[in-house]
Image: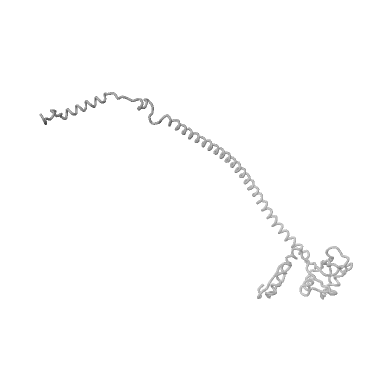
Amino acid sequence: MPGNKPNHKPVSKPARQLLFSEALQHKRLTPTKINPQTSPPLNEPTTMSDKDQPTTMDRILQEITTVSRRIEGMDASITSLTLETKSMRSDIAGFQSRVTGLEQSMGSLETQINTSQEREQDFLYLRSKLTDMEDRSGRDNIRVLGIPENEEGSDMQAFLTSTLPKMISLDFDPPLEFQRAHRIGPKRSDNSSRPHPIIACLLRHNQTRQILQVARNHGPFRIDQREIRITADYSKETNERRKAFLALRPQLRKLEMKYGLFDPARMWVTKNGVS
């Protein structure tokens, strides 16, 4: 009959589940055909090809070789540093020995310097004592400067005994007496050069003081238009100390200050009545 539908019985839900399970089990048990051209061989890794494997190994070997060379270079540098360190240690040891030697030398030098300073102090003390003794031994002496050579004749004491009182205009009672009198240096035959000074040692100290006081206050003196000076007989060191005050005299005069020298070489200055 037209319009008739096929006669199918509806399948229940439990029946459908049973059919599905059987179909699934049949599929699992059916063997799968393997195409040898498209499938990879068994028991071989599928992550790396035959062409890629040697290239990767070469790179690894190259990196290992590079690292090894770097390590060898580091070993050489470490060896060089070790040698330099040993050399520096030996140099430092040498410097330390030299410093030790210098310290010992410095200690010895300090001892020598201290000893030399003590000796210098002793020398200065002895020199001052010697100068003082020389000044004391010549306190009865006078120096006469400017008398021409050979004018005294053969007797210097007689010449001074008769010439000095007239030259300084001073009478002595008792008369002048000398222990000794002579010129300093070799005798000259002519008067063309500066005459040698005369050193005279008087017998009486008070007469020496009188002559020197008159010479300071009224000198220099003149004989036949020749200038004659009389001074005390000091040592060389004392004369140098006395000459050091000469530069101060013009300044003291400008300041209108009184000044003078104590024997042997001490200067005094007075201003406004205060010395």
Vertical side of 134 occupied by 14: above or below: above
Quarter of the image with the N terminus is top left
For residue 5, side relative to residue 215 (left or right) = left
Quick one: 13 or 82, which is closer to the camera? 13
Looking at this view, name the residue that lies furthest to the front: 2
For residue 70, side relative to residue 230 (left or right) = left
Vertical side of 222 occupied by 56: above or below: above
The x and y percentages for residue 227 are 82, 72
Quick one: 86 or 185, which is closer to the camera? 86
For residue 234, side relative to residue 8 (left or right) = right
Q: Quadrant of residue 168?
A: bottom right
Tell me the colour scheme of the image.
Answer: one colour
Q: Quadrant of residue 26?
A: top left
Vertical side of 97 occupied by 22: above or below: above
The x and y percentages for residue 78 are 54, 38
Q: What residue is rendered at 70% in x and 56% in y?
A: 120
Q: Quadrant of residue 147?
A: bottom right
Q: What residue is rendered at 74% in x and 65% in y?
A: 240
Looking at this view, name the residue that lies furthest to the right: 154
Looking at this view, name the residue that lies furthest to the left: 1
Q: How many numbered callouts?
A: 0
Quick one: 15 or 257, which is closer to the camera? 15
The x and y percentages for residue 150 are 88, 68
Quarter of the image with the C terminus is bottom right
Q: What residue is rendered at 19% in x and 27% in y?
A: 19
The x and y percentages for residue 4 are 11, 30
